[in-house]
Amino acid sequence: MLAAAAARRSALSAGRVASRDSLWLNWEKFCDSLGQPSTLQGLPEESIISIFSIYAIRYRDGRASRSGEPVRADTVDEALRAVGATLSGMGFPDPRLLPSGKIKPRLFALLRSFSKADPAPDRVHPATLQILQSVVALAASDGTPRAAAIADL
């Protein structure tokens, strides 16, 4: 069983493994603060969803996040996924998911409300390769030192 766990971990990048481990330790600390088992075994379904919801809210506002700072909805989702994946890797069911594999409606609605409250991401319009080639060609055709410097940039 340990060999299988090691093989699964080797499929992930070192950064992903460290992140999951860190998120799991964070989850254990949170569950300890509530006096609940980190595996959630023996708890009624309603309690499990409530614990996950409380964790999501506290993670979102920074009280349970690793940085102590508020985080975006996708970061909360990542933390919940990491906890679910760790539990699944231990042989327990992922408490976030229905048997169909879809996220449970209460968690889905909570994450969606976080996502709607997040500001729009800062978008940067990339300069395409064609634009860059055109700028270089125009600068090079001028033949002045200034144009050569622009082409080099």
Image (spheres, helix red, strand yellow):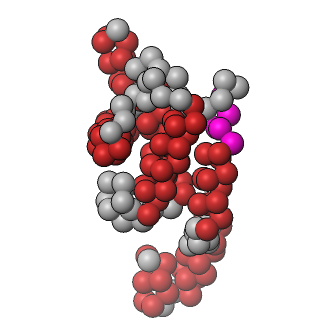
> Magenta segment: does it hold 103?
yes
Q: How many marks?
A: 0
Vertical placement of 77 versus 99: above or below? below
Q: Quadrant of residue 20?
A: top left
Q: Measured from the top left, where is residue 150 in percent x and y?
A: 47, 83
Residue segment shown in magenta: 101-105
Report the residue at 65% width, 55% height from top: 112
Q: Quadrant of the N terminus?
A: top left
Vertical placement of 111 versus 144: above or below? above
Asked whether, in this view, residue 115 is left or right of residue 67, the answer is: right
> Magenta segment: does it hold 145?
no
Vertical placement of 58 versus 14: above or below? below
Q: In the depicted view, which residue is nearer to us: 145 or 51?
A: 51
Report the residue at 58% width, 36% height from top: 46
Asked whether, in this view, residue 118 is left or right of residue 29, the answer is: right
Report the residue at 42% width, 83% height from top: 149
Q: Measured from the top left, where is residue 140 in percent x and y?
A: 54, 80
Vertical placement of 73 versus 119: above or below? above
Q: Quadrant of residue 73?
A: bottom right
